[in-house]
Image (cartoon, grey):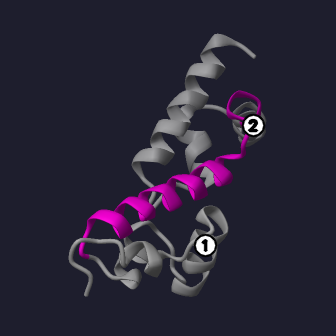
Amino acid sequence: MSESNKAAIIKAKEILASNIQNPPSIKELARKIKLNEFKLKFGFKKLFNQTPYEFLHKERIKHAFNLAKNSEMNISEISAAVGFKNQGYFAKAFKRHYNISPKDIMKTREYYY
């Protein structure tokens, strides 16, 4: 993989990380970094050992954990804030990743409502 392709794929990761609530599609992302979709997906998997979707999903769940632990937001607000359209799917994905529900994390807050 060329250095310019590596730089483009790293830029794609940064774009995804900064737009977790409303990320660009693979097609839009490829256009932004000036690579074709195949090179983007193949290079992302090669560099980061995960697909762009897997990376985005993990970033959303990590951000949701921080919000559940440190904010006063409820589950539906957290779900929307990190880009999940379905609150039930969000709760399942969170529990699958951390082996604890978002509600149980929220109960550890200093002020739990």
Residue 108 in the image: state x and y as whole percent: 35, 72
Asked if the magenta segment contains residue 51, the reply would be yes
Which residue extends farthest left?
Answer: 111
Residue 37 in the image: state x and y as whole percent: 72, 42
Residue lying at 40% horizontally and 84% vertically, measured from the top left:
76
In-front residue for pair 40/36: 40
| Of callouts 2 and 1, the N-terminal one | 2
In-front residue for pair 5/27: 5
Q: How many angstroms separate mark 2 from mark 1 (CA)?
A: 25 Å
Q: Amino acid at mark 2?
A: Lys
Query: Which residue does the numbered mark 2 point to in the structure image?
Result: 45
Instruction: Count neighbours of disc 2 (C-alpha within 10 A) and say few if under 14, some if 14 to 19, many if 20 or more.
Output: some
Residue lying at 57% horizontally and 26% vertically, measured from the top left:
8
Q: Give the magenta-colored segment's residue range.
A: 45-72
Image position of 103 (left or right of 55): left
In-front residue for pair 95/43: 95
Above or below, 12 relative to 100: above
Query: The residue tagged with tag 2: helix, strand or loop?
Result: helix
Query: The residue tagged with tag 1: helix, strand or loop?
Result: helix
> Residue 86, which numbered label?
none
Query: Which residue does the numbered mark 1 point to in the structure image?
Result: 95
Magenta segment, prevailing SS (helix, strand or loop) = helix
Residue 32 in the image: state x and y as whole percent: 52, 39
Residue 102 in the image: state x and y as whole percent: 47, 75
